[in-house]
Image (cartoon, helix red, strand yellow):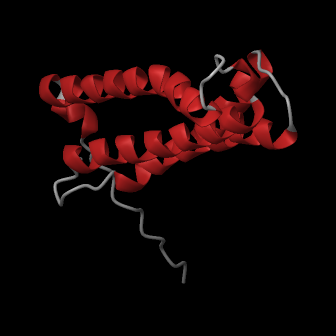
Amino acid sequence: MTGLLVGVIKLILGSSMIHPIQFLLDYPVAFTVLGLAGAFAFRNKKGELNIRWALFGLFFASFFRLVAHIISGGVWFGEYAPEGWNVWLYSAVYNTSYLVPETLITFGVILLIAKTQPAFFKLKNRPARLKSSVVS
């Protein structure tokens, strides 16, 4: 849900809409797939996040965001490709140029937090559920 909201906010704050499908691929779809990373937030019995799976989720979700942007770029922004460049190669190079650094920075931040503040990724103790009492 958060990814979808980020995509909508980016759209509101300034975007380019060439075609309705391009709009969907570049904003709601591209950012919603980032939420797939959360599907890999596995925890052990102590409530500790499995960092390896979380990092796999980061790369998995980032890959699908890249795919959405490459498709959009290849179909609707191919006119910006330098002469002689294949539009798909141009779209891949352009989108990879900012998504790979973004993913690597996120990777580094996750590792840094995991090493310096491991409690950040640990579930807090939750209060036991209140048992409902039956009034006789």
Residue at (33% x, 59% y) in the render = 128
Res. 114 in view:
yes
Q: Position of residue 46 (x, y in %)?
A: 16, 54
**Direction from residue 28 to residue 1 in the image, left or right:** left
From the image, which quarter does the N terminus lie in? top right
Q: Position of residue 17 (x, y in %)?
A: 84, 27
Residue at (54% x, 27% y) in the render = 95
Residue 95 against residue 122 in the figure, above or below: above
Residue 54 image-quadrant placement: top left
**Direction from residue 44 to residue 99 in the image, left or right:** right
Q: Position of residue 99 (x, y in %)?
A: 47, 26
Q: Nearer the viewer, residue 132 or 40?
A: 40
Pick out the residue farthest to the left: 115
Q: Nearer the viewer, residue 50 or 104?
A: 104
Pick out the residue farthest to the front: 84
Q: Position of residue 112 (x, y in %)?
A: 20, 23
Residue at (48% x, 20% y) in the render = 98
Residue 80 image-quadrant placement: top right
Could you tell me how many numbered marks the image carries? 0
Residue 56 against residue 94 in the figure, above or below: below
**Direction from residue 46 to residue 85 in the image, left or right:** right
Residue 122 against residue 120 in the figure, above or below: below
From the image, which quarter does the C terminus lie in? bottom right
